[in-house]
Amino acid sequence: MNQDLPSALDLESIRQCLRFVLDSRILQGEFETRLGVEEADVMALLYDWPPSAVEKIGPTGRLAISNSLNEVCNGLSISDVEWSKWFTVSRDRVAATLRSWSESLS
């Protein structure tokens, strides 16, 4: 695993994905099943965002980030109107963040 923190833009993309899956309620009733973590885990991760070091994210946080990015990019249908309510970064930026995040875990 790469020990470098993601770029500032990637950190912001991750934060927005985490906030979306938590606060939009789009995963209500399926949150833990689809993300593999509890809402409280994502809340705790966001509370300490951004992380000061990648080691501080921990395995539960890494799972939450991976699955949140994947849901936003590949699992959920998010209209353009809904996207503009929750995100300031583009869909392409989130997809690039998912790729770089996934590569950093290898």
Image (cartoon, rainbow, N blue to C red):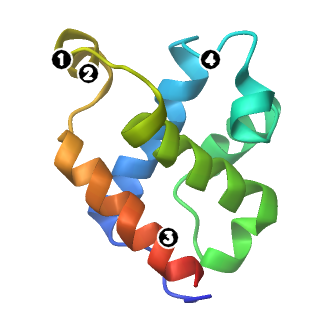
Q: Which mark is residue 80?
A: 1
Circle 3 SS class: helix
Question: What residue is drawn where x is 61% and y is 76%?
Answer: 54
Question: Residue 86 occupies which quadrant of the picture?
Answer: top left
| Image x and y of residue 67, in percent | 60, 47
Front disc: 3 or 2: 3
Please identify the quadrant where the C terminus is shown: bottom right
| Image x and y of residue 40, in percent | 80, 31
Q: CA distance from mark 4 to mark 3?
A: 22 Å
Q: Which mark is residue 83?
A: 2
- Judging depth in this view, the residue of 88 and 71 nearest the camera is 71
- Judging depth in this view, the residue of 18 and 63 nearest the camera is 63
Label located before the other in sequence (1 or 4):
4
* Dot 3 alpha-carbon crowd within 10 angstroms: few under 14, some 14 to 19, many 20 or more: some
Identified by mark 4, the residue type is Leu
Residue, disc 3: 102
Question: What residue is drawn where x is 60% and y is 24%?
Answer: 22
Question: What residue is drawn where x is 58% and y is 11%?
Answer: 25
Q: Are marks 3 and 2 in contact (CB under 8 Å)?
A: no
Circle 1 SS class: helix
Position of 40 compared to 104: left or right?
Answer: right
* Dot 4 alpha-carbon crowd within 10 angstroms: few under 14, some 14 to 19, many 20 or more: some
Identified by mark 1, the residue type is Asp
Residue, disc 4: 27
Identified by mark 3, the residue type is Ser
Task: Classify 7 as above or below 87.
Answer: below
Label located before the other in sequence (3 or 2):
2
Position of 15 compared to 48: left or right?
Answer: left
Label located before the other in sequence (4 or 3):
4
Q: CA distance from mark 1 to mark 4?
A: 18 Å
